[in-house]
Amino acid sequence: MLCNSIKYAEKVEESKQVGRVKNLLANQATEFIPTYYAVLYYGKSYEGKLLKPSEYRKRWNREEVLKTHNFISKKLRDCFGAVHFQWFLNRHSQYEDNEGNCKKGSFHSDLYIGEISNASIEQPSNALLTLMFSAHQRGYSINIEEIGIDQAKILLLEMCIRQAKWVGVHKNSLFIEEVPIEEFHQTFHYGMKDITELDHFNSIVDWKNSSFYKPTNGEN
C-alpha cells in the first residue's frame, strides 16, 4: 500500500510539472503574437497519389518528419522574413495490422506561426516573388486588392508550406487558419494534448525548428 501511495504521489507531482511546462511554452509563444495554426498531414505523395510502402513507412520516422519541418521553416523565413513558429509532432490513432498487432499511427504536425508583416507582402522577397510567379504560371494568381492583405497572407502561407514534397497539392494534406488571440491558449494546448509525462516533451516538441527560448551555455 505504501509503495502504491508513493507512486501515486509521484504521478500527481509529474502531472503538475507537465501542466507548468505547457503553460510556460504557451506563454513564450504568446510573446511572438501567434496568428496562424496549421495541421500538416503526410499520407499522400506531392501530387496527391498513393505512396509506395517504402515511402509511406517514412511517415513513422521522427527524424524524417523533422527534415520536413526544417525545410518548411527555411521556406517560411525566405518568403516572409523573421517569422516565429512552434512545431509539434503528434501521431494518428493506433491501429491493428493484418495480424492483429496494435501499431502506433503515423505522424502529423501541428504548426503555430507568428505574425506576418504587411511589409513582407507589399514588398515581397525574391523567394516570395518566385513563389507567386510560379503560381501565376499554373493559372493561380492572388489579387491582394480584391481579397485583402489578411486573406492574401493565408493563401501565400499555404502556397509556401505546400512546397514541401510531403505536403504537396492534395487538398487534405494541409489545414491552416487564422487564430484570434483570445482563442490561442486553447488552440496551442491542443497541440500538446498527447503530452502527459515529462519525457513526452522531447518526443513531441520539435525544439530545434521552433522559436522557443533556448538558454545559452552560461545560463542555468
Image (tube, rainbow, N blue to C red):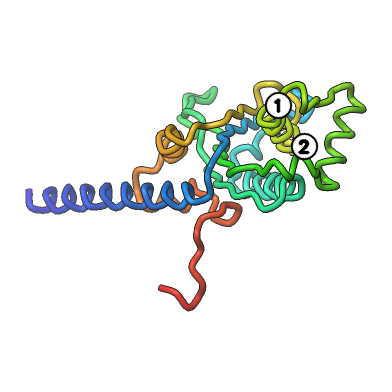
Q: Which residue is mark 1?
A: 148
Q: Nearer the viewer, residue 206 or 188?
A: 188
The reply to whether residue 90 is in sight is yes
Q: How many marks?
A: 2
The reply to whether residue 55 is in sight is no
Q: Residues within 10 Å of mark 2 (few under 14, many from 20)?
A: some
Q: Position of residue 118 (x, y in %)?
A: 69, 41
Going by the numbered disc 2, the residue's amino acid type is: Gln
Which residue sits at x=51%, y=63%? 214
* Displayed quadrant of residue 124: top right
Tell whether 213 sits left or right of 59.
Answer: left
Q: Residues within 10 Å of mark 1 (few under 14, many from 20)?
A: few
Q: Nearer the viewer, residue 202 or 181?
A: 181
Going by the numbered disc 1, the residue's amino acid type is: Gly
Q: Nearer the viewer, residue 164 or 79?
A: 79
Q: Position of residue 187 (x, y in %)?
A: 45, 34
Q: Position of residue 188 (x, y in %)?
A: 45, 39
Residue 122 vertical placement versus 66 (above, below): above
* Displayed quadrant of residue 40: top right
Which residue occupies the extreme left position in the image? 1
Which residue occupies the extreme bottom position in the image? 218
Which residue sits at x=48%, y=78%? 218
Give the CA separation, mark 1 to mark 2: 23 Å
- In the rendered image, which quarter contains the C terminus? bottom left
Q: Which residue is mark 2?
A: 163
Which residue sits at x=35%, y=43%? 196
Compare marks 1 and 2 and give the one earlier in the sequence.
Answer: 1
Viewer-nearest of discs 1 and 2: 1
Tell whether 54 sits left or right of 208.
Answer: right
Callout 1: SS: loop
